[in-house]
Image (spheres, helix red, strand yellow):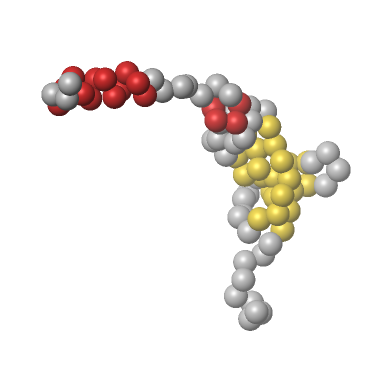
Amino acid sequence: MKKGIHPDYRPVVFRDPGAGFAFLTRSTISSDKTIEWTDGKTYPVVDVDVSSASHPFYTGRNRVLDTAGRVERFNQRYGRT
């Protein structure tokens, strides 16, 4: 790999403020905000809108679509009997 062309790869905290969930991982993203993590060190923090703690698919709060009703409605609308 060429030196000096790659972004800095460092520990970053991703935080979902709506769910009160945060995790520490490594990333190239930069942020001006920082947070003190449980190990006592300070890391840059990136606030995200959706994480596994708040996404309906992962939390089990997703809706089940009524596919049978959709098929019947389609058939009524477009003349299949």
Indicate the position of residue 59 as horizontal and vertical percent values. Answer: 61, 26
Of residues 57 and 48, the one nearer the viewer is 57
Position of residue 59 relative to residue 13, above or below, is above
* Res. 23 in view: yes
x 23%, y 25%: residue: 74
* Residue 46 lies in quadrant: top right
Indicate the position of residue 6 as horizontal and vertical percent values. Answer: 62, 71
Indicate the position of residue 9 as horizontal and vertical percent values. Answer: 68, 62
Of residues 33 and 77, the one nearer the viewer is 77
Residue occupying the far bottom of the picture = 2
x 51%, y 24%: residue: 62
Q: Which quarter of the figure is the N terminus placed in? A: bottom right
* Residue 33 lies in quadrant: top right
Q: Is residue 80 left or right of residue 36?
A: left
* Residue 57 lies in quadrant: top right
Residue occupying the far right of the picture = 39
Position of residue 48 relative to residue 75, above or below, is below
Indicate the position of residue 79 as horizontal and vertical percent values. Answer: 13, 24
Residue occupying the far left of the picture = 79
Q: Which quarter of the figure is the C terminus placed in? A: top left
